[in-house]
Amino acid sequence: MHYDVLVIGAGPGGCMAARELAERGFRVLLLEKGVLPRDKVCAGILTPGAKRLIEERFGGIPPECLDEPPVVRGAVLLCERGGDYMLPFGGEGLRIRRAALDAHLARRSGAEIWDGCEVLGFELGRFHVRVHLEMEGEERWVEATYLVGADGAEGLSSRLVRPEFHRLYAVPATERTMLVTTEGTASWDPEWMGLALLRRGLGLARFFCRGEEVGMAISFRGDRGWQGELEALENFLSQRISLRLSGSPARALASSNRMGSKGRFNLGAGCALLVGEAAGLLDAWGFGIRLALESGRVAAESIAESAGENVTPHLRYRYRMREILEREVSMLRRLSGVVGELDVSEIVASRSVRGKRDRRALRRRFVS
């Protein structure tokens, strides 16, 4: 069975690539390991830029994809050394139910969808991909001319397309994120995402409040445990926003990759292009959907423009992504104006000793 393009991963980046290619007449197969709608560990924040891209290419976001309260105005950064800073978006973001949104985007992609399908491996030629997969308890092979890998920070695509790059740069920069949700109360406006800059651990944690639910996410690497960092975050928030927890916590583990903070991105090779976190695309604050959508669209355009030529599309993709990558790295290093999609004017404007200290700590976090 032969397709023009195989897309691995039905997240926003994979669905964007699939839609752009299907609209151009390519026969696209979208492969997803989980059964849609499937859970995804995610902050559930759709930044204004991500919202705009989805509405432009997929139409309006249906109500069943939204969570309460639906509007997100930006983030508030709380620093353990004392500073509090408002970091607004340049427009309204949305709080979304990630499982429902991904399923909606997949349905609207125009691709043939195989979910509950695990990719076991693949072989790459110059203009040929042969993928080994398991579906409904049976192993099979499927072939295509091109591949788009959108299966995340620890997906198979990143490991197999450029294995040496993955070993040297992606593995050392991989972080684990523990998301804990439980019943609780806090003195907090739920229309704002919470960020906490702590002195211990990796430094930048996230939290949110919605109704009687509180969520906290902390990052860690390698063999370092997360319990101590979570306890430090709980203690900090109990003092700063009167956090009070109750009930039994639910935990979920996810992975992300920070190699992009050092200007290292794995965009693929030959006929295989990587998008989103598979490529190392993650903004300074940990929001990845906008960059996944942007890279998915550029990957699809690069394949479409290369079709029929004797030049593999990764060359065009690398050239077209250069401006986006330079923009993201520059944001991390200059820490002024807008970083990601958050306006950092308030923290930049602080001339106090505390403000200068907070800026140094935040910059260290961004480029660590």
Image: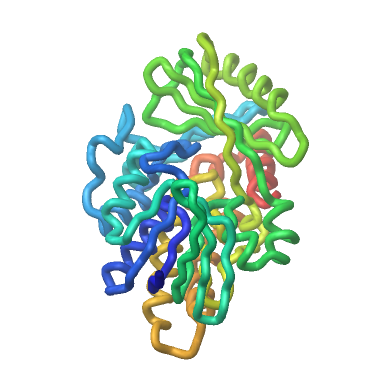
Q: Is residue 340 visible?
A: no
Name the residue nearer the viewer: 342 or 280: 280
Q: Considering only vertical position in the picture, is 330 above or below 215?
A: below
Name the residue nearer the viewer: 361 or 2: 2
Instruction: Name the outermost residue toward the right.
Output: 223
Q: Is residue 46 left or right of residue 360?
A: left
In x, y percent, where is residue 76? Answer: 49, 33
Q: Which residue shows up at 50% across the image and 31% down it? A: 194
Q: Considering only vertical position in the picture, is 273 above or below 196?
A: below
In x, y percent, where is residue 3? Answer: 39, 71
Labels in figure, total: 0
Q: Is residue 16 left or right of residue 154?
A: left
In x, y percent, where is residue 8? Answer: 47, 58
Q: Which residue shows up at 25% across the image and 45% down it? A: 61
Name the residue nearer the viewer: 105 or 141: 141
**Quarter location, residue 264:** bottom right
Q: Is residue 7 visible?
A: yes
Q: Which residue shows up at 65% across the image and 27% down it? A: 80
